[in-house]
Amino acid sequence: MLVWDDVRLHLTAGTKEFIEANAAWLTVFPLPAHAPDLNPAQGSWALVKRDLGNPAAADLSEITRAVKRRLKKIQYRPDLVDGCVTAAGPSLDG
């Protein structure tokens, strides 16, 4: 299964060829180009940004470390991850 946001960047000849060549087993679920409400990753980034606030970092590596720490915290909170998936709409029950 491929859940695919329909960004122009993804509409390359190679991508189209891959999808056509694997149509027997690959199901493609196209999303609109900008659909944050359908993308569980957007919920995760919202949690990171909420915790991060508006830092005054000395350099990019400092921001990178802060973001990685927050992502790690989310990783160990399955309830938060489940909430992001549930908010995006798909069922967790399979």
Image (cartoon, grey):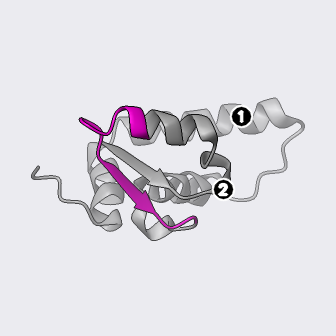
| Residue 35 on image: x %, y % | 50, 68
Residue at the limit of the structure toward the left, as seen here? 93
| Residue 60 on image: x %, y % | 83, 35
Locate the N terminus by quadrant: top left
| Residue 69 on image: x %, y % | 56, 34
Say which element carries label 2.
helix
Say whether residue 61 is left or right of residue 18.
right
How far apart are labels 2 and 1 at the CA level? Answer: 28 Å
Q: What amino acid is found at the position of numbered circle 1 in the picture? A: Thr
Q: What amino acid is found at the position of numbered circle 2 in the picture? A: Arg
Residue at (66% x, 38% y) in the render? 66
Pointer 2 or 1: first along the chain:
2
Which residue position is annotated with label 1?
A: 64
Span shown in magenta: 20-33
Q: Is residue 27 above or below residue 72?
A: below
Query: Around disc 1, counting alpha carbons within 10 Å, would you say few (fewer than 14), some (14 to 19), or many (20 or more)?
Result: few
User: Magenta span has 69?
Assistant: no
Q: Is residue 72 above or below residue 89?
A: above
Residue at (32% x, 42% y) in the render? 77
Q: Is residue 87 above or below residue 52?
A: below
Q: Is residue 28 above or below residue 18?
A: below
Q: Quadrant of residue 6?
A: bottom right
Say whether residue 66 is left or right of residue 89.
right
Say whether residue 29 is left or right of residue 46.
left
Which residue position is annotated with label 2?
A: 8
Front-most of residues 8 and 69: 8
Q: Which mark is residue 15?
A: none
Front-most of residues 19 and 9: 19
| Residue 32 on image: x %, y % | 50, 67
Say which element carries label 1.
helix
Query: Around disc 2, counting alpha carbons within 10 Å, would you say few (fewer than 14), some (14 to 19), or many (20 or more)?
Result: few
Residue at (64% x, 52% y) in the render? 52
